[in-house]
Image: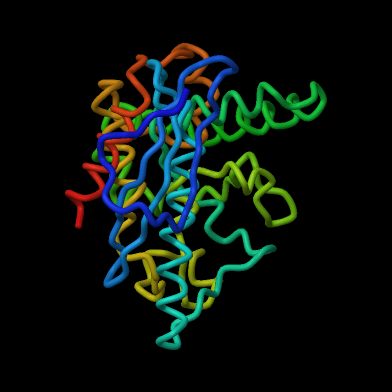
Amino acid sequence: MTTSLPFVRDARATVTLAAPVPDGAAAMSGTVGVRVGADDMTIAVTVPADPVALDALLPVFHGLTDAIVDRVADRAAATGQRVSCHQGCGACCRQAASISPSEARGLARLVAAMPPERRAVIEARFAAARAATAPILATALDDTAAAGTEKFGLAYLALGIACPFLEDESCSIYADRPMICREHLVSSPPVECRTPGSGRVTGIMGTARMTKAFRAVDTALEQRGILLLNEALEWAATHPEGVPHPGPALVQTVFAQLAASD
């Protein structure tokens, strides 16, 4: 069963996104408009009609983030500002990547679904990273504001701890990487990302719109602030389930938050 979502704005969809819908379950579909700079994008969305946790809808929001990033990158290229990020450059993968609670659950599920030998390797990397960063992580986990400060970010970067998913200076879970990683695009030389406090990093995305919109909704639903990526497995193990809400209502809430950020 597929019915229309109540936020239809334009029937001409340019991007089609869908979250998994269990066999035999009801789905709802509709379209919504998103403005990126001076451009209008129309997004077609299909989600479960029944209550689900927000992490079940991550494929939709990952796809939307990619669509927005691609549009911004194209517009930047048209003005001569080209993305310098490339495969094999892991400069940003030693920074303090922050994620929302639902993203932590998504990463934990991803690791749990890996073959046993592979899962053991990744889990060991998480444990090592948590141990190495414990002194400053303790501050960040108790104080969301502290985790977002430049001082904290520089202290974390100075430790040189690679993301547990980094291999050969490339992301091993690229298709499933967090939203903040998707929105981290620069036109400055990649090496400058190793010293973000230098003032020589030129970002293309500006405000990380999708990351901010999603985490604003997620942290409000969870009554919990942002987390560091290194904490994802440990936190998700003690908080395995999100609070279910109707899929269409969750999508509407995040889109409303995105619109409010314009």
Residue 55 appears in the picture as rendered: no
Task: Check the image and report above or below for 126 versus 16.
Answer: above
Q: Quadrant of residue 76?
A: bottom left
Q: Nearer the viewer, residue 31 or 258?
A: 31
Percent position (x, y) of residue 55?
45, 27
Q: Nearer the viewer, residue 101 or 80?
A: 80
Q: Quadrant of residue 120?
A: top right
- Identify the residue shown where x is 26% and y is 48%: 258
Percent position (x, y) of residue 189?
52, 77
Quadrant (top left, top right, bottom left, bottom right) of the C terminus: bottom left
Q: Quick one: which residue is furthest to the right in this view?
A: 117
Q: Quick one: which residue is furthest to the bottom in this view?
A: 80
Q: Is residue 69 left or right of residue 115?
A: left
Residue 262 appears in the picture as rendered: yes
- Identify the residue shown where x is 45% and y is 46%: 179
Q: Nearer the viewer, residue 257 or 103?
A: 257
- Identify the residue shown where x is 58% and y is 35%: 129
Q: Please say which color scheme the image uses.
A: rainbow
Q: Is residue 148 left or right of residue 137?
A: left
- Identify the residue shown where x is 29% and y is 29%: 219
Q: Is residue 85 left or right of residue 248?
A: right
Task: Check the image and report above or below for 159 versus 88.
Answer: above
Percent position (x, y) of residue 97?
45, 45
Percent position (x, y) of residue 249?
28, 27
Q: How many marks?
A: 0
Q: Quick one: which residue is furthest to the left in this view?
A: 260
